[in-house]
Structures are given as C-alpha cells and as structure tokens.
C-alpha cells in the first residue's frame, strides 16, 4: 500500500531529494578521483552513487499515488576540493543520514504504521552505515597518497548494500541473492 500519512510522505520526498543529490555528487567526485589517477576511489564513488539511486528509486515508488508538484527540501553537501576533502564531504553526508535523518524518518514511518516507507528507510539506513566505513577507508588511503585497494565493488540492487570484493551469498540487509549484486 502506498504512503497514507502526510509526515511520512514529506520524509519520503525529502529522502528522495537527498539521495538524488548524493547520487549526482558522487558521480562528480568519482570522475574527479579517476582523473587524478585514483581509479578505485572513482569506482567506489560510482558504485555508491548507484546505491543512492537504489534508495531514491525505493523512496519514489512508495509515493506512487501522490500527485502534484512539490518543493523538496533535503540536506546536501556542496563543493569541489581535494580527494581527501571530497571524501570528507561524503563521510559527513553519510553520517548525517545515519545519525540524524534516517533514524527520525524510520521512527516516524513506524509510528504511522507505514510499512512500505519503513522498509525503504530501513534499507537506506543500513546501507549508509557501510558507505560511511568504505569512504573512511578510501580517505585513510588517500591521506597517505594511495588509492584504496580492492578487486571490485558490488552493490545490492534491492537495498543498496555495498561490499568490496566478493558479494555475500545473501545480502545481510534484504536477503537478496549474490547473483543479483551489480559489480563495479
Ligand atoms: Fe550512502
Ligand atoms: Fe540488499
């Protein structure tokens, strides 16, 4: 059933806006990292950009019978800096989602018994926790002048779970099978 309550609907639109901007921002920063020779950091940005697209897609679909035009307010990080600075921007954005935004949105959806939004916010919250860790690993490497090391990055197309190297047999967040993961 699509969303019924105005407050949860507002939060779905805001989360959709935030994820949409994160998607684009990570593509921009990913291209810059690649140009500077940090190929894996660029791949990580692009893989996580895809994960944010998954989140935006999930939030959007929960609004399927909502009609009309809306002005959408969402938190976003701006600016272009060094790789280390761009990664800090990414970490800050992820931490805002993990510590402030998604816990509030998730609890509102639970309170309003919005099962679809609850699922969508839960998937995003859990995936963002992994994103913050991966961006921190890439930043630690970049601070030492190195590119993060991995063979591949894999993203669950259902919930946005992101893992370096081999995908797990079952997604730890949503249970999707290994074969469904998208590789970068
Ligand atoms: Fe994220
Ligand atoms: Fe998943």
Image (tube, grey):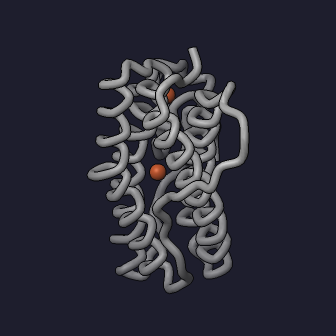
Above or below: residue 180 compared with residue 53: above
In the picture provided, is 120 more to the left or to the right than 107? right
Above or below: residue 79 compared with residue 68: below
In the picture provided, is 19 more to the left or to the right than 107? right
| Residue pictured at 34% horizontal, 46% vertical | 129
Furthest residue toward bottom: 81
| Residue pictured at 39% horizontal, 31% vertical | 122
- Count all numbered tags in the image, as a single digit: 0
Indicate the quadrant containing the N terminus: top left, top right, bottom left or bottom right.
top right
Q: Position of residue 102 (x, y in %)?
A: 36, 43
- Quarter residue 108 falls in: top left
| Residue pictured at 59% horizontal, 32% vertical | 58
- Quarter residue 182 falls in: top right
Q: Position of residue 155 (x, y in %)?
A: 56, 39
Q: Between 115 and 158, which is closer to the camera in this rendering?
A: 115
Above or below: residue 108 compared with residue 115: below
| Residue pictured at 59% horizontal, 74% vertical | 33
Q: Position of residue 137 (x, y in %)?
A: 36, 62
Q: Between 113 and 118, which is closer to the camera in this rendering?
A: 113
Furthest residue toward top: 1
Q: Position of residue 130 (x, y in %)?
A: 37, 46
């Amino acid at each position: 059933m699509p969303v019924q309550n105005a407050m949860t609907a507002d939060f779905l639109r805001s989360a959709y806006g935030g994820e949409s901007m994160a998607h684009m921002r990570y593509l921009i920063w990913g291209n810059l990292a690649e140009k500077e020779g940090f190929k894996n950091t660029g791949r990580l940005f692009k893989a996580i950009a895809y994960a944010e697209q998954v989140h935006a897609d999930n939030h959007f679909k929960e609004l399927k019978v909502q009609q009309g035009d809306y002005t959408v307010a969402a938190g976003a990080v701006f600016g272009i800096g060094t790789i280390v600075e761009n990664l800090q921007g990414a970490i800050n954005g992820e931490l805002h989602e993990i510590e402030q935004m998604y816990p509030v949105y998730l609890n509102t959806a639970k309170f309003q018994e919005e099962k679809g939004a609850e699922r969508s916010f839960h998937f995003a919250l859990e995936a963002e926790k992994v994103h913050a860790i991966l961006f921190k690993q890439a930043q630690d490497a970049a601070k030492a002048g190195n590119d993060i090391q991995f063979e591949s990055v894999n993203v669950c197309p259902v919930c946005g779970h992101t893992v370096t190297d081999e995908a797990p047999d079952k997604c730890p967040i949503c249970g999707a099978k290994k074969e469904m993961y998208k590789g970068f």
